[in-house]
Amino acid sequence: MMTVGSGLSSRQSKILNDFENELDVLTALADDKRQHLITLLCEHSREGLTVSEITRMMPITQPAVSHHLKILRKAGLVTYDKRGLESIYRLTLREPFERLEKNIHAMSVWIN
């Protein structure tokens, strides 16, 4: 990460730092399989989906689904609730997207 001492203004440094803090979200969203997974969870937002259900809807293995869900959880885009032996996954996009929107807005104000 660059610092103010490296020729950046404090405003530039803050914006870059804010984006750096969102790398997990941006990385999670960059993968086409995770994008597909997010759309499935959007379609089933009320009831959520189990790993088994997601696996039946996607052309990837159960371990791959679990791997992608782990990345989405780490990024704060997905949460789960235990129901017996199964976990029900749901999206939690609002907060991460609001942070991204704020960062993009700060960048656009800075540019204009």
Image (cartoon, rainbow, N blue to C red):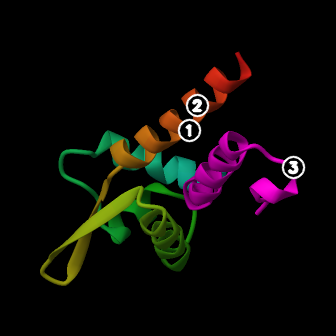
User: Residue 59, percent across and down?
Assistant: 57, 60
Contact between marks 2 and 1 (CB within 8 A): the answer is yes
Magenta residues, start to end: 1-28
CA separation in Å, label 2 and label 1: 5 Å
* Residue 31 seen in the current view: no
Contact between marks 3 and 1 (CB within 8 A): the answer is no
- Secondary structure at numbered mark 1: helix
Q: Hey, what amino acid is under mark 1?
A: Asn
Residue that label 2 marks = 106
User: Residue 29, percent across and down?
Assistant: 59, 50
Above or below residue 93? Residue 6 is below
Residue situated furthest top in the rendering? 112
* Residue 97 seen in the current view: yes
User: Residue 93, percent across and down?
Assistant: 38, 46
Looking at the picture, tell me which residue is in the foreground, 17 or 53.
17
Residue at image point 56% right, 38% down: 103
Q: Quadrant of the image for the N terminus?
A: bottom right
Q: Hey, what amino acid is under mark 2?
A: Ala
CA separation in Å, label 3 and label 2: 20 Å
**Looking at the rendering, which quadrant does residue 98 occupy?**
top left
Residue situated furthest front in the rendering? 5
Left or right: 106 with respect to 72?
A: right
Residue that label 3 marks = 7
Residue at image point 70% right, 49% down: 13
Mark 3 / mark 1, whichever is N-terminal: 3
Above or below residue 13? Residue 98 is above
Residue that label 1 marks = 103
Left or right: 30 with respect to 89?
A: right
CA separation in Å, label 3 and label 1: 21 Å
User: Residue 18, percent across and down?
Assistant: 58, 50
- Secondary structure at numbered mark 3: loop
